[in-house]
Image (cartoon, rainbow, N blue to C red):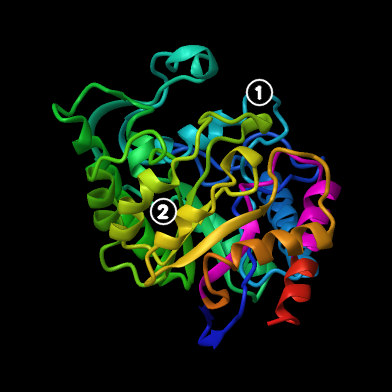
């Protein structure tokens, strides 16, 4: 895989979330009608936390860093979905932030953002995130965001006659955002969209194409089976079903959960598109036990039976934001150590 014009064998990266220091609590960034930062104190603590997040990834030995989503309230047990689901809508035009409760017991505590008018990009959303990471590191890094397809099904649509039009206009708005971030010097973005295990309808790829049109950065797409508080949402492997979407996607890297025993079906990856890099989880985002480098190295070797080393990215199954900092760091450190073991064998 090429990173800054250099070929890197078995590159490593975290997915997105990383636990925050105990002294950073509450919301950091404002919504559309608020200042970018809730307070100057929030800005200072957030930027300091981002520096720690970047430093620990560097110390672990990762090749591509993630922003760690240090602006999310990871420390609120049971309510971590709230900022993940509502951060983007609260910063776009066309939404009313406080709508009806979510569907089902799991989502009932989280209000739905209401689509009241045409969805539009009004101002940069992730500008402070890019700024904070640029202050924190000179390494390549990616910024992660919830994708338009998934976002479109968790809002209360009171404006569009076609529900897919919600996703399309979300994608157009995010296209403006990504082009702005590219202008700031951002090198990579990570789409977090886990709708694909539930449905494989082709409009999801149309939405991706709208969002990434003219966006010349490294593009990741993360798919998992649910990991909030260690709980999964999908209980059967869907890799074969999703493969047509992976082949049609305009992204460069597709990252999938593959560490859980229930999803150990690696044979399906023989059909993975050869024009893309396959990112596979080798560290669990649900189990607090820190895997040894030897255990992780064996998982990597097993995956190399299905995808060549020049097209395999090594990663945890999902974000590590729900763990303690010591556990999250140890998982990344041991993962990178395992990669060095395997690289020496190739």
Left or right, residue 250 beside residue 329: left
Q: Is residue 116 above or below residue 271?
A: above
Q: Is residue 38 above or below residue 140?
A: above
* Residue extent of the magenta highlight: 311-335
Q: Is residue 232 above or below residue 168?
A: above
Count the marks: how many? 2
Image x and y of residue 282, in percent: 67, 55
* Between marks 1 and 2 in the image, the one whose residue lies nearer the viewer: 1
Residue on which the image places disc 2: 124
Left or right, residue 252 beside residue 289: left
Name the residue at 60% across, 37% down. Answer: 262
What is the distance, in whole Å, between disc 1 and disc 2 at their CAs?
A: 29 Å
Q: Residues within 10 Å of mark 2 (few under 14, many from 20)?
A: some
Q: Residues within 10 Å of mark 1 (few under 14, many from 20)?
A: few
Visible residue check, residue 241? yes
For the residue pair 229 and 18, the one nearer the viewer reads as: 229
For the residue pair 52 and 6, the one nearer the viewer reads as: 6
Q: Secondary structure at mark 1?
A: loop
Q: Which mark is drawn over residue 57?
A: none
Q: Quadrant of residue 226?
A: top right
Whether label 1 touches label 2, CB < 8 Å:
no
Image x and y of residue 145, in percent: 47, 48
Visible residue check, residue 190? no
Q: Quadrant of residue 270?
A: bottom left
Residue on which the image places disc 1: 78
């Amino acid at each position: 895989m090429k990173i800054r014009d250099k070929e890197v064998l078995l590159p490593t990266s975290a997915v997105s979330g990383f636990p925050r220091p105990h002294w950073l609590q509450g919301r950091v960034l404002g919504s559309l009608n608020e200042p970018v930062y809730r307070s100057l104190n929030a800005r200072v603590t957030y930027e300091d936390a981002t520096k720690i997040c970047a430093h620990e990834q560097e110390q672990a030995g990762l090749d591509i860093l993630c922003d760690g989503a240090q602006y999310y309230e990871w420390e609120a047990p049971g309510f971590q979905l709230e900022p993940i689901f509502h951060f983007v809508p609260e910063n776009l035009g066309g939404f009313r932030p406080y709508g009806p409760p979510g569907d089902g017991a799991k989502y009932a505590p989280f209000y739905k953002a209401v689509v009241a008018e045409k969805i539009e990009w009004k101002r940069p959303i992730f500008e402070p995130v890019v700024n904070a990471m640029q202050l924190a590191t000179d390494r390549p890094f990616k910024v992660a965001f919830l994708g338009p397809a998934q976002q479109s099904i968790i809002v209360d649509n009171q404006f569009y006659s076609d529900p897919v039009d919600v996703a399309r206009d979300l994608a157009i708005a995010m296209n403006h955002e990504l082009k702005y971030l590219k202008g700031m010097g951002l090198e990579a973005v990570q789409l977090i969209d886990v709708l694909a295990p539930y449905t494989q309808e082709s409009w999801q790829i149309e939405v991706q194409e709208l969002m990434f049109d003219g966006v010349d950065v490294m593009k990741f797409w993360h798919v998992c089976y649910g990991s909030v508080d260690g709980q999964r949402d999908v209980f059967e492997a869907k890799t074969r079903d999703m493969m047509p979407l992976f082949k049609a996607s305009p992204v460069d890297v597709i990252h999938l959960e593959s560490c859980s025993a229930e999803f150990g079906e690696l044979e399906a990856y023989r059909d993975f598109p050869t024009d893309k890099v396959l990112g596979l989880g080798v560290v669990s985002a649900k189990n607090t036990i820190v895997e040894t480098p030897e255990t992780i190295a064996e998982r990597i070797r097993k995956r190399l039976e299905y995808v060549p080393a020049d097209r395999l990215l090594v990663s945890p199954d999902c974000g590590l934001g729900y763990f303690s900092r010591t556990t999250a760091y140890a998982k990344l450190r041991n993962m990178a150590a395992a990669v060095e073991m395997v690289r020496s064998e190739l």
